[in-house]
């Protein structure tokens, strides 16, 4: 949908900001912020968007290009993070060995401080 069409539909109350937010999968504040970045301001008394930005007016810009595309990953390729780790406890391992099995390698970051 072009910006000019979108502004006309909002001012004619054919579509609401909440409906646009559902359409583009963002919040209504994000929609309002994008419209404001384009140079439009909302007139509360007349309930219309007025263009207050620099010329030329961005009427022919596709509104969907203002949002980042979300890349969807198929469920088969997603890593399942809810897998439970199975801890095998041998007779030779003690409690500390069992606790250390699930730990990650220590980070290379060095913390320094003054006391």
Image (cartoon, grey):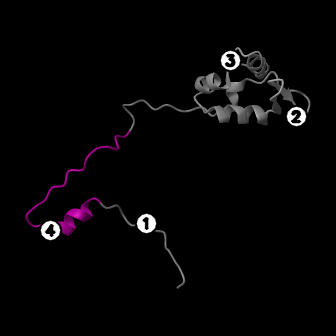
Label 1 or label 3, whichever lies nearer to me, is: 3
- Residues 96 and 15: in front is 15
Residue 78 is left or right of residue 27, and the answer is left
Give the secondary structure at mark 3: loop
Mark 4 or mark 3: whose residue is earlier in sequence: 3
Label 2 or label 4, whichever lies nearer to me, is: 2
Label 2 or label 3, whichever lies nearer to me, is: 3
Mark 2 or mark 3: whose residue is earlier in sequence: 3
* Crowdedness near tag 4: few (<14), some (14–19) or many (≥20) residues, C-alpha within 10 Å: few
| Residue pictured at 10% horizontal, 67% vertical | 92
- Residues 110 and 54: in front is 54
| Residue pictured at 25% horizontal, 47% vertical | 84
Q: Are marks 4 and 3 in contact (CB under 8 Å)?
A: no
Q: Position of residue 42 (x, y in %)?
A: 80, 30
Task: Report, in whole angstroms, how far the alpha carbon at label 2 lies from the one at label 4.
Answer: 70 Å
Label 4 or label 3, whichever lies nearer to me, is: 3
Quarter the N terminus occupies: top right
Dividing the picture into quarters, in which one does residue 57 lie? top right
Task: Report, in whole angstroms, how far the alpha carbon at label 4 lies from the one at label 3.
Answer: 66 Å
| Residue pictured at 68% horizontal, 31% vertical | 31
* Crowdedness near tag 3: few (<14), some (14–19) or many (≥20) residues, C-alpha within 10 Å: some
Label 1 or label 4, whichever lies nearer to me, is: 4
Q: Which residue is mark 4?
A: 94
Q: Which residue is mark 1?
A: 107
Magenta stretch, overall SS: loop
Q: Which residue is mark 3?
A: 15
Q: Which residues are magenta?
A: 79-102
Mark 2 or mark 4: whose residue is earlier in sequence: 2
Give the secondary structure at mark 1: loop
Q: Which residue is mark 2?
A: 53
């Amino acid at each position: 949908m072009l910006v000019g069409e979108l502004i006309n539909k909002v001012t004619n109350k054919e579509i609401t900001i909440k409906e646009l937010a559902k359409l583009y999968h963002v919040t209504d504040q994000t929609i309002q912020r994008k419209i404001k970045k384009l140079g439009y301001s909302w007139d509360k008394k007349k309930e219309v968007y007025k263009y207050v930005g620099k010329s030329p007016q961005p009427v022919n810009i596709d509104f969907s290009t203002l949002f980042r595309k979300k890349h969807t990953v198929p469920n088969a390729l997603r890593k399942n993070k809810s897998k439970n780790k199975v801890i095998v406890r041998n007779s030779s391992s003690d409690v500390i060995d069992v606790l250390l099995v699930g730990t990650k390698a220590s980070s290379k970051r060095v913390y320094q401080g003054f006391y």
